[in-house]
Image (tube, helix red, strand yellow):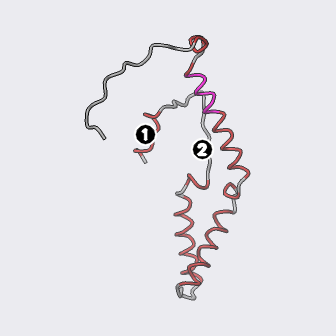
Amino acid sequence: MSSKIPPFVPPSPYVPFFRRFTDERAADLAETIALHAQVQRSFSASLWSNESTFESFGRLVIDEVSERVDLPASDEVREQLFLCLYRLLEAETQIFACPDIDWSTAIVSTRTAAAAWWKR
């Protein structure tokens, strides 16, 4: 493997003829909207979109934990454990919710996505 820097090759100014008459940004936005709609339909058809998923998943986790660890027999302790787990799962919005986006006001860019991610 050579450690020499490869020679500079300037980018080509060539643009395909029909792309000169299209709005690339609008086409990208349309593709993004279509992808979001497809993901939202898939999510709506999945088990994770069901309102009772929190409770059934929480109960399943508590049952699995109780098989491996001796939990106190107190119903109050068990309910507090379930409440803690429920609140933890409720914060996992990426799993249990699909965002509704107002495309008329949304700014779709890598910069805004990164900024939103860092604000969390």
Residue at position x 61%, y 55% from top?
96
| Residue 99 tag number | 2
**Label 1 Cα neighbours within 10 Å, binned few <14 / some 14-19 / many ≥20:** few
Residue matched to label 1: 114
Predominant SS of the magenta segment: helix
Q: Residue 111 falls in which quadrant of the image?
A: top left
Q: Is 4 or 82 nearer to us in this picture?
A: 4
Lower position in the chain sequence, tag 1 or tag 2: 2
Type of amino acid under label 1:
Ala
Residue at position x 61%, y 13% from top?
18
x and y percentages locating residue 107 in the rendered image: 51, 30
Query: Would you place residue 34 above or below residue 19 in this image?
Result: below
Residue at position x 67%, y 68% from top?
56
Q: Is 82 or 64 nearer to us in this picture?
A: 64
Q: Residue 67 falls in which quadrant of the image?
A: bottom right
Query: Would you place residue 45 above or below residue 73 in this image?
Result: above
**Direction from residue 22 to residue 12 in the image, left or right:** left
x and y percentages locating residue 51 in the rendered image: 69, 58
**Label 2 Cα neighbours within 10 Å, binned few <14 / some 14-19 / many ≥20:** few
Type of amino acid under label 2:
Pro
Asked if the stretch drawn in magenta spans residue 29, the answer is yes
Magenta highlight range: 25-33
